[in-house]
Image (spheres, helix red, strand yellow):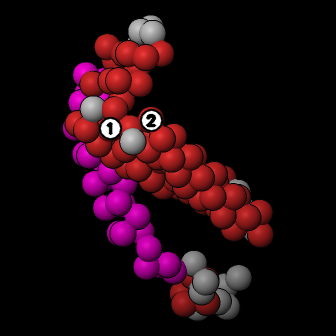
Amino acid sequence: MAFLTDRKRVDGLGSAREGTRHFWSMTVTSVALLILVPMFLFCVGPLWGEPHEDVIAGLSRPFTAIITALMLGVGFHHFRLGVQTLIEDYVRGVARKIWIVVMTLVSYGLAASGLVALAQIAL
């Protein structure tokens, strides 16, 4: 160990050049969610416990549909970024890459299914 140079000790442990973009994506989605969550709760909250027809009518309104769509898109993107950080911190080897791909597919799949369901309700 004493004969290793400083470069040899850190070889392969350098920057992946993704940290800044990931940090800013998390920051931007966090700020967007700070704005979207209260708006979403204000629009969709009153629909809680209402009859089916009232919920369909409420989600068919353009403003409510847009806020719900933005909430689904931004929320699941933020979820994907957070889960990716969690996996990178705690999973090693090939399993890390597999879990990142699986969770990316799950998060975007859930967002897509939510948007399709919203489109069917709103249109």
Magenta-span inclusion, residue 32: yes
Residue 95, quarter of the rendered image: bottom right
Residue lying at 29% horizontally and 42% vertically, measured from the top left: 66
Range shown magenta: 14-42
Instruction: Give the residue type that dot 1 points to.
Output: Ala
Local crowd size for mark 2, using a 10 Å CA cut-off: few (<14), some (14–19), many (≥20)? some
The numbered mark, 1 or 2, whose residue comes first in the sequence reads 1
Disc 1 from disc 2: Cα separation? 9 Å
Query: Which quadrant is home to the C terminus?
Result: top left
User: Helix, strand, or loop for circle 2?
Assistant: helix
The disc label shown at residue 65, or none: 1
- The mark closer to the camera, 1 or 2, is 2
**Nearer to us in this view, 97 or 72:** 72
Instruction: Give the residue type that dot 2 points to.
Output: Ile
Magenta-span inclusion, residue 120: no
Residue 68, quarter of the rendered image: top left
The spot of residue 114 in percent (x, y) is 51, 42
The spot of residue 4 in percent (x, y) is 64, 89
Left or right of 78, for residue 32: left
Q: Is residue 83 above or below residue 123?
A: below
The spot of residue 88 in percent (x, y) is 60, 60
Secondary structure character of the magenta stretch overall? helix
Left or right of 21, for residue 36: left
Task: Provide the residue designation for mark 2.
Answer: 121
Circles 1, 2 touching at the beta carbon (< 8 Å): yes
Q: Is residue 68 in view from this perspective?
A: no
